[in-house]
Image (cartoon, rainbow, N blue to C red):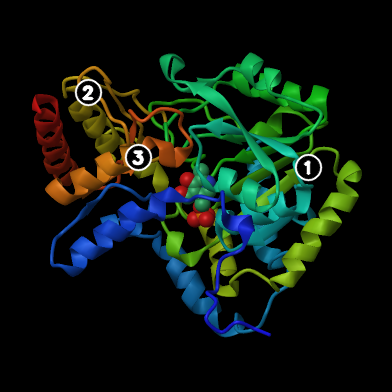
């Protein structure tokens, strides 16, 4: 007999799954907003609310194609959009890129989950950077796998060390994830490190999962090398989409491109197709946005050059944070973030989540704590550099005040 007093509880599959960037801190911010406070949100890489507008061609094309976008599309995605993605990678040096090797999804997030779910058998290991974009760790666990973190070195531009990565490969390792440009550190990896990572995959028969969603947000001429261009014998899945470069995160539009020895991945791709079929298709109007975005005027270029908004904001935030006593922060080469370290001598922090919640309550500034990115210590915060320079100046001076009080206690 059913006990009607019993609670409905979540599946044990979720016990160890975390996504803290939208967890208790964000809930506390929402509570404060309901109580009438204005919160400066430096916690999520969501360009539109900071006044970054989508290139107009995308919107016009979407409006024009809306009447024809009422039905489901093919599960793999609208053909013209997949052609556009293939052409985009051809232009980036992948001469063989074809629309058959492109799949479209509701943002990179959905594709990360599907790619891992189709791959992972219980207890399989996935090599993931620390710090990471936490969906990679959470989705690996949800799929029944074990995330194994390799460390990106703060003393060496937050680059990973291929030797350390290789030392973590076991017979259960299935794939190596790289996030380049990196969220949360802003690092862009040099070619030699990427080549060494590709070589590890080659020698240990691993799939390379390259999350390159920030690939066009690059500063000061840092070289962005698409991992897929470095081999034709390593099965590589490249992830990207419209959320960041094209500033339409709300449209939920992304893609994967599978390259390398696809003939050895037929069974895997069948599994992936099954998952794609089960969710019918990605949002069709947003699939149409892809063609307009990739073929249209690449307005991101104005934002990332000196005097461009993204560039100036990142550099201002870096300078102001570096000026705070006991704060060290690596200058970013790309993406939308900085990952400063607070000296434990001056700012001993036991619980970094409690620390950012206290900052939020006192100063009404919302940051994420380092451990939300599976980072090992409690001395880091992640700062999103999307607000206007004037807003960053105010916010960082509030953070500096908070830290001064913290020091003096
Ligand atoms: N990958 C990285 C590294 C990200 O930072 C994000 C979003 O912040 C995503 C993937 C998810 O992007 P999407 O909006 O396409 O789901």
- Nearest to the eye among marks 3 and 1: give it: 3
Which residue occupies 26% across, 63% down? Answer: 30
Q: Secondary structure at mark 2?
A: helix
Q: Left or right of 403: which side holds 242? A: right
Q: Left or right of 238: which side holds 154? A: left
Query: Which quadrant of the rendered structure holds the C terminus?
Result: top left
As rendered, which of 119 and 89 lies closer to the eye? 119
Which residue occupies 70% across, 19% down? Answer: 166
Q: Position of residue 270 (x, y in %)?
A: 85, 58
Q: Residues within 10 Å of mark 2 (few under 14, many from 20)?
A: some
Among the two numbered marks 1 and 2 on one chain, the one whose residue lies closer to the N terminus: 1
User: Residue 322 shows which numbered tag?
Assistant: 2
Residue under circle 1? 96
Q: Quadrant of residue 203?
A: top right
User: Residue 285 shows which numbered tag?
Assistant: none
Q: Quadrant of residue 13?
A: bottom right
């Amino acid at each position: 007999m059913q006990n009607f007093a019993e609670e409905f509880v979540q599946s044990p599959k979720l016990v160890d799954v975390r996504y803290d960037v939208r967890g208790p801190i964000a809930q506390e911010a929402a509570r404060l907003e309901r109580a009438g406070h204005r919160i400066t949100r430096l916690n999520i890489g969501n360009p539109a609310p900071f006044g970054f507008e989508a290139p107009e061609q995308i919107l016009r094309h979407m409006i024009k194609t809306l009447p024809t976008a009422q039905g489901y599309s093919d599960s793999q995605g609208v053909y013209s959009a997949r052609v556009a993605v293939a052409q985009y990678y051809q232009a980036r040096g992948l001469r063989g890129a074809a629309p058959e090797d492109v799949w479209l999804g509701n943002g990179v997030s959905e594709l990360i989950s599907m790619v891992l779910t189709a791959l992972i058998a219980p207890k399989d290991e996935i090599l993931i950077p620390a710090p990471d974009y936490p969906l990679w760790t959470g989705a690996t666990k949800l799929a029944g796998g074990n995330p194994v973190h390799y460390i990106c070195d703060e003393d060496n531009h937050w680059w990973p060390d291929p030797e350390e990565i290789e030392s973590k490969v076991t017979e259960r390792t299935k794939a190596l994830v790289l996030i380049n440009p990196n969220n949360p550190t802003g690092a862009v990896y040099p070619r030699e490190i990427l080549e060494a990572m590709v070589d590890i995959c080659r020698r240990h028969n691993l799939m390379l999962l390259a999350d390159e969603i920030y690939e066009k947000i690059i500063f000061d001429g840092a070289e962005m090398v698409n991992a897929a261009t470095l081999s034709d014998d390593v099965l590589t899945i490249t992830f990207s989409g419209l959320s960041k470069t094209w500033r339409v995160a709300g449209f939920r539009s992304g893609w994967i491109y599978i390259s390398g020895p696809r003939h050895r991945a037929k069974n895997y791709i069948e599994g992936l197709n099954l998952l794609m079929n089960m969710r019918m298709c990605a949002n069709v109007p947003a699939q149409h946005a892809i063609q307009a975005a990739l073929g249209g005027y690449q307005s991101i270029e104005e934002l990332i050059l000196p005097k461009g908004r993204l560039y100036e904001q990142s550099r201002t935030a870096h300078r102001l944070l570096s000026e705070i006593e006991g704060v060290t922060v690596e200058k970013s080469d790309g993406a939308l973030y900085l990952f400063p370290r607070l000296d434990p001598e001056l700012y001993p922090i036991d619980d970094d989540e409690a620390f950012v919640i206290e900052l939020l309550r006192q100063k009404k500034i919302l940051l994420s704590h380092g451990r939300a990115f599976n980072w090992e210590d409690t001395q880091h915060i992640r700062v999103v550099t999307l607000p206007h320079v004037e807003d960053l100046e105010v916010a960082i001076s509030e953070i500096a005040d908070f830290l001064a009080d913290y020091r003096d206690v």
